[in-house]
Amino acid sequence: MKADAKIYVAGHRGLVGSALVKNLKSRGYTNLITRTHAQLDLTDTLAVSQFFAEEKPEYVFLAAAKVGGIVANNTYRGDFIYANLMIQNNVIHQSYLHGVKKLLFLGSTCIYPKNCPQPMKEDYLLTDVLEYTNEPYAIAKIAGIKLCESYNLQYGTNFISVMPTNLYGPNDNFDLEKSHVLPALIRKIHLGKGLENNNWDIIDRDLDQLPIEGVSGSSFQEEKLAILSKYGVAKSASGEVSVEIWGTGKPMREFLWSEDMADACVFIMEHRNFQDTYQKDQKEIRNTHINIGTGVDISIADLATLIKEKLDFGGTFKFNTEKPDGTMVKRTDVDKLHNLGWKHNIDIEEGVAAMYQYYLGQTVNC
């Protein structure tokens, strides 16, 4: 890509999209195109068509998606499959129609079967049933992979699909109702530490920045205690603070710093093509997507303990075994990615520390 190439980053305000914009700017790219959802609804076929006709981007990073945690995925099943299919279909098809030189489509490792062999290789796609709670989202992402793959094979496009593992980093979602496990644990343990130390200034700043069900720092203390308890941050009569964690804590998860993810995406866009994603002697070209991850996992219980240590929290954890664990093990095989020439930089210990510092910048120091 030339420094002045027209590059459209779809979903630039999201976790990956914002990291992509930062990475591209740091590399000297000067002609980035972005649109907010209010400016361009990617589920609107006509609007997306008009956008591509007017802007004529040369390269596209498709990081826009409707995302959420296990509860949101299981509750809003129709919303997740519809919105993601529409976004993907519109952007990928218009990229084909308007001659985009290269497109990078971002999916998720939830595309793999519920009981997938570990670590998860690209070839394991569609070999068994999916995890039920996020099946609609996963099916949409699989459709995106196959759309890119099929357009490449039929029309000669250069559309590459990448499947990131669990991501975390700057601009993550800390909403306790909708966030993923790592940012949720950081916020809950941060609030637990404030409760443990009777530091209501910390708690009030947090709730002012991100109210929970309308409860802010200016609410009555009883209301704040009640909402914290509802979301699993509670103080007993003896003064001991506990943080609730959904499930048994035994599931293993792999986490990738979002800025590492962005770096991998830009590396692939700059240096690799669709033809690099499969063996040339394959009779059937499939599973051309690329896993993006660290290849290293950690249990939810150990992750919580790591965060506890980083935050110097002295309370306890309560595992709510009535809540679902989801898939017990999810670790990516990243041999394909490594063979293409990229490896992650930030390990989980460094990432958790950086994530907490970012969160403090949004709350305590705001």
Image (spheres, rainbow, N blue to C red):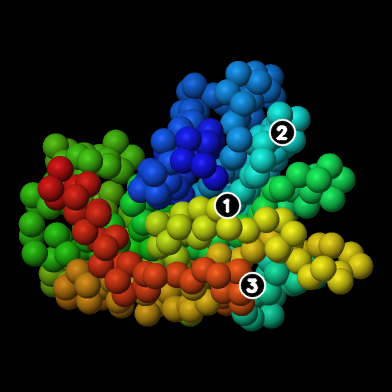
Q: Amino acid at mark 2?
A: Gly
Give the number of the mark in front: 3 or 1: 1
Disc 3 and disc 2: Cα gap in Å? 28 Å
The local crowd at label 1, few if under 14, some if 14 to 19, many if 20 or more residues have their Cα within 10 Å, is some
Tag 3 secondary structure? helix
User: Pointer 2: what residue?
Assistant: 99
List the residue tagged with mark 3: 336
The residue under the point 54% across, 45% down is 1
Judged left or right of residue 225, residue 46 is right
Q: For label 3, count other residues whose C-alpha is less than 10 Å away and answer few (under 14), some (14-19) or many (20+).
A: some
Instruction: Report which residue position mark 1 lands on.
Output: 269
Picture residue at 72% right of the left edge, 56% below the top: 274
**Which amino acid type is shown beneath numbered disc 1?**
Met
The numbered mark, 1 or 2, whose residue comes first in the sequence reads: 2
Lower position in the chain sequence, tag 3 or tag 1: 1
In the rendered structure, the answer to whether residue 55 lies left or right of residue 155 reads left
